[in-house]
Amino acid sequence: TEKFKRLKNEGNDFVKMGKYEEAANKYSECMKLNTEECTVYTNRALCYLKLYKYEEAKRDCDHVLQIEDSNIKAFYRRALAYKGLQVRKKNVPGI
């Protein structure tokens, strides 16, 4: 749990610096230690949204909502992911 906390804090620090790729990697490491901790999934979803990785963000939010079906952050970030996916479809001809 100490390693988990340290990794999560490092991820949070990367987010504050705008280093979303690095932060996502830290949160991914956290998940290897604990797959039930929802905050690392919603945090990683935020990073994916910032990196325009909408499908990945949606997947993380879906995971959280399977564990906590009333997680507001997961609902909100999943909505942003859906919005990003819709915009992408509109801007890419032939989809």
Image: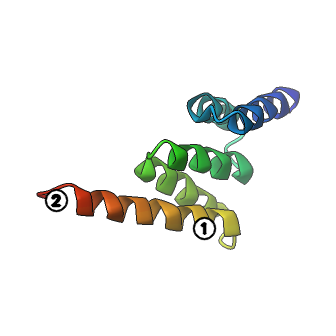
Total numbered labels:
2
Residue furthest out toward the left: 94
From the image, which quarter does the N terminus lie in? top right
Q: Which residue is mark 1?
A: 76
> From the viewer's perspective, is residue 24 above or below residue 35?
above
The CA distance from mark 1 to mark 2 is 25 Å
Mark 2 burial class by Cα count in 10 Å: few <14, some 14-19, many 20+? few
Q: Residue at x 46, y 47 (%)?
A: 56
From the image, which quarter does the C terminus lie in? bottom left
Residue furthest out toward the right: 2
Q: Secondary structure at mark 2?
A: loop
Observer able to see residue 31:
yes
Q: Residue at x 67, y 44 (%)?
A: 35
Task: Give the side of residue 39 with respect to residue 58, left or right.
Answer: right
- Where does the image place residue 89, in percent across and percent down from the top left? 26, 60
Q: Residue at x 70, y 31 (%)?
A: 14
Task: Give the side of residue 85 with respect to residue 78, left or right.
Answer: left
The mark found on residue 63 in the picture is none
Tag 1: residue type?
Answer: Tyr
Observer able to see residue 37:
no
Q: Secondary structure at mark 1?
A: helix
Q: Which residue is mark 2?
A: 95
In the rendered structure, which disc, 1 or 2, sits on the residue that comes first in sequence? 1
Task: Give the side of residue 15 with respect to residue 24, left or right.
Answer: right
